[in-house]
Image (cartoon, helix red, strand yellow):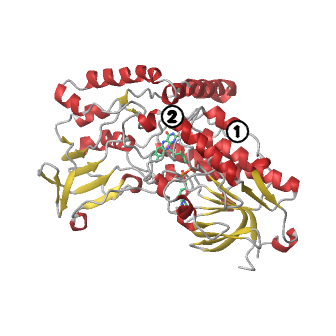
Amino acid sequence: MDDVHVHEVAIVGAGFGGLGMAIRLKQDGTDDFVVIERGDDVGGTWWANSYPGCQCDIPSNLYSFSFARNPNWDRAYPMRDQILDYLRDCAERYGILPHTRLNCELLAATWIADAQHWELETSTGPLAARVLVAAPGLLSEPSSPSLPGFERFRGKAFHTARWDHSDDLTGKRVALLGSGATAVQVVPEIQPRLAKLHLFQRTPPWVIPHMDHAVTHAMRELYRRVALLQKLSRASIYALRETMVVGITRDRRWLKGQELNARLHLRRQVPDPELRRRLTPDYEIFCKRIILSSEWYPAIQAPNVALVSSGVKEVREHSVVDGDDVEREVDTLIFATGFKPAELPIAERIRGRDGSSLAEVWGGSPQAYLGTTVTGFPNLLLFYGPNLNLGHSSIVYMLESQIAYALDALRTMRLRGAAEFEVRPAVQAAYNAQLQERLADTVWNTGGCGSWYIDRNGRNSIQWPGFTFEYRRRTRRFDAESYRLAAPVRQPAAFAAPAA
Ligand SMILES: Cc1cc2nc3c(=O)[nH]c(=O)nc-3n(C[C@H](O)[C@H](O)[C@H](O)COP(=O)(O)OP(=O)(O)OC[C@H]3O[C@@H](n4cnc5c(N)ncnc54)[C@H](O)[C@@H]3O)c2cc1C
């Protein structure tokens, strides 16, 4: 690796996190960085999820970069294609594409203590960087249950995050597993063209009416001319959503209004009391992500849909046998079964100061300081890392907070002539102890649902337990006193050889 140029920063992932970091880095005057992305386009989540009906569930006046306002959203909650176009446009407009290597997967990252930099092994060759920003996405590794007999299945089978567009499913018999956020978006889109849909529901979700609406041409024109208007819209969406934090983390009575909203929605859309019973969740609202849809209940009551609550007993060559021993003829099997956020493969690939991987250090329960830095892993920034997920607002807001923190870390390194930063173990431990204490009484931990927020050790390593403005405040400045900063062991010139 001696002849490999050492970049200032290497960024893994070209979703909102990786692209946002790259744009801000460039605006801050750093040009020596590389973005690597295993996919064949930028966009992350919005590139990978091309299933019919894919849409954000936070209005895009908020779910977008604060520094790249877009007056052209044609819906309050835009569809996947428009969000993907927005991200492609940002990558191009801010000059990130020349720094980006597509179809390039990070296979291993090793901290080289003597050289004070990261060596990266990628699918297209070696790279090196002083600072590694890992932005691989929390929801980027599809999770599918292992079903008895699945290997015998002769039809098509795919996960919603890897949608197979070679067949539009017209006239097909489909088994769809899952009834979460993705299933609720997919089913109303595909149900009308199917011969039969067997919908395997493990737990019914809480569903409230969708408030989506078209943004009129006149409104878009107004946003274009009066930027302040869109900023006000962003601010009011933000403020309204923050009020939910009180109910989620402090006083459940604040969630009762939304529960009533969901119950009335179910009553209005599902007349059959027995079906209503099967569709009523037995856990508290907000324990899992709340679902927005005005089309889910009508779609699943269509004559060609069978709601199956008994689970999958076995898969055969052309059928799925449910838990009540009913054999269901199936051409295509679709997994709308979510992701593996606490077991990201990249955690096995990043090795720190003592040679251990993140996965080994975490043992199934990811933790970091401010969800961003990890003891034993110098110059590593995780986006969006442990305990930074939200149930109520825009992840882009959290990512932008992390980006500000990361940039200040780089500035601090420059100002202080440091070559390394590593969070102090006591700081990380105290932060996580406090975090878990705060999470203990939240609806995610005690609301009676088995959600992906709780990892295999029974710990909530996914959710942020407070207001997002608290996180913004805590990440405004890089708190150097929480870190061990180390001076260069060699002169910078020794590792800043120009690119070959
Ligand atoms: C269907 C869906 C809908 C969502 N809707 C919302 C919403 O409405 N509001 C909201 O706030 N959040 C939503 N989210 C969460 C969403 O993931 C985040 O908002 C945001 O897009 C995360 O951006 P990211 O850059 O961190 O990760 P991603 O967008 O997942 O990007 C990560 C990128 O890293 C790449 N990568 C991973 N590993 C490697 C590797 N080893 N080498 C190279 N590249 C790698 C991946 O290919 C991917 O392109 C949704 C998620 C999903 C799946």
Marker count (numbered): 2
Say which of 335 and 185 sits in front: 335
- Find residue 473 and report its horizontal and vertical position in percent: 70, 35
Q: Residue at x 24, y 45 (%)?
A: 199
Indicate yes or no: mark 2 CB to ligand 1 under 8 Å: yes
- Find residue 295 and report its horizontal and vertical position in percent: 32, 32
| In contact (CB < 8 Å): disc 1 and disc 2 | no
The residue carrying pointer 2 sits among few (fewer than 14), some (14 to 19) or many (20 or more) residues within 10 Å by Cα, namely many
Q: Residue at x 41, y 38 (%)?
A: 288
Q: Residue at x 81, y 72 (%)?
A: 495
Give the Cα distance between marks 1 and 2: 24 Å
| Residue that carries the numbered disc 2 in the rendered image | 58
Under circle 1, the secondary element is helix
Tell me the quarter of the image containing the C terminus: bottom right
Q: Is residue 4 something that shows in the picture?
A: yes
Indicate yes or no: mark 1 CB to ligand 1 under 8 Å: no
Say which of 272 and 223 sits in front: 272
Tell me the quarter of the image containing the N terminus: bottom right
- Find residue 208 and report its horizontal and vertical position in percent: 38, 27
Q: Closer to the N terminus: mark 1 or mark 2? A: 2
- Three-letter residue code for mark 1: Arg
Say which of 150 and 246 sits in front: 246
Q: Residue furthest bottom?
A: 2
Residue 38 is left or right of residue 407, and the answer is left
Q: Residue 222 appears in which quarter of the rendering?
A: top right
The image's mark for residue 474 is 1
Q: Residue at x 16, y 37 (%)?
A: 303
Residue 148 is left or right of residue 440, and the answer is left
- Three-letter residue code for mark 2: Ile
Say which of 119 and 51 sits in front: 119
